[in-house]
Amino acid sequence: FIKEYSGRVGYKSDLPVFICGMPRSGTTLTEQIVSSHPDVFGAGELTYIGDIASYLSNRGEVSPEIIKELAETYLEKLKARDKTGKAKRITDKMPGNCMNLGLIVMAFPDAKIIHCRRDPIDTCLSCYQQNFSTGHYWSYDLEEMADYYKEYEKMMAYWREVLPGRFLEIDYEETVNNFEEQARKLIDHIGLEWNDACLEPHKQKRSVLTASRSQVTQPIYKTSVEKWRKYEKELQPLISKLG
């Protein structure tokens, strides 16, 4: 269905910017950088795409007409988030949307997608250390977490195959080590002119409601790179299973 109808259905709009990836992979930092641009509104983690996916799954039917109708409804909800009505781009930073990239591409053929990546062991360690408010039950066991991460990697390999060149992949380590270069790459990807405000994302006034709120309100730092080495002995079940 994706290959047959990609680019031919959905709602033509470049307003949405989807930021996805594993939890704790740099999605919040990425949104903070992008939404520092005066033409971007950061809407945070929205459940809308997941709701659409669940609806389609329960309905058991997918058609170009249904996709377009659902895309219009999503866009109305997204626009309502920006009270000024002036934003040229609005970010949807739900990490789990990486499971729904096919649906996103179908619904919004002109939307920009950013996939955030980070060192697998650092990502899993950060998930293990975080007491998530809901869900992510796989994050309480090192071996189960390794299994989950490997399934996520398989899924992203599939999207690269069926959606070549359709999304930008950004690495956390590159972001903190070559910040301006990566920030410019992000703004270029979403089709806006550069603005120096994106060099100081920690100065934003917007509310951040995710687990990374304490990190992204500080200037960029590098101490979370290879943090796992401090706990290498304790993390052996995870490291071994990740291979």
Image (cartoon, rainbow, N blue to C red):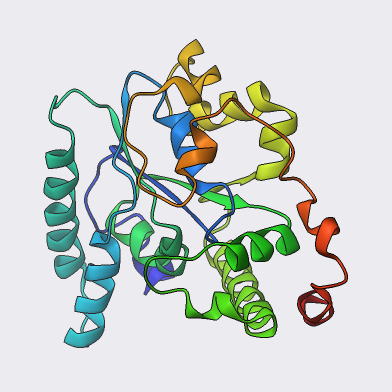
106 or 154: nearer the eye? 154
Residue at figure coordinates x 52%, y 19% from the top left: 200
Looking at the rendered structure, the number of numbered marks drawn on it comes to 0
218 or 54: nearer the eye? 218
Quarter residue 101 falls in:
bottom left
Residue at figure coordinates x 63%, y 28% from the top left: 220
Quick one: quadrant of the C terminus? bottom right
Coordinates of residue 91 in the picture (x, y in percent): 34, 41
Coordinates of residue 188 in the picture (x, y in percent): 51, 26
For residue 195, say whether it is visible. no
Indicate whether 53 appears above or below 81.
Answer: below
Quick one: quadrant of the N terminus? bottom left
For residue 207, say whether it is visible. yes
Q: Is residue 39 left or right of residue 69?
A: right
147 or 227: nearer the eye? 227
Q: Is residue 86 left or right of residue 152?
A: left
Quarter residue 7 falls in:
bottom left
- Residue found at the very far top of the displayed protein: 196
Residue at figure coordinates x 22%, y 69% from the top left: 52
Quarter residue 66 falls in:
bottom left
Q: Is residue 29 left or right of residue 227?
A: left
Coordinates of residue 205 in the picture (x, y in percent): 34, 24
Coordinates of residue 197 in the picture (x, y in percent): 46, 14
Residue at figure coordinates x 51%, y 51% from the top left: 166
Indicate whether 131 appears above or below 87.
Answer: below
Q: Is residue 95 left or right of residue 238?
A: left
Indicate whether 58 appears above or below 20.
Answer: below
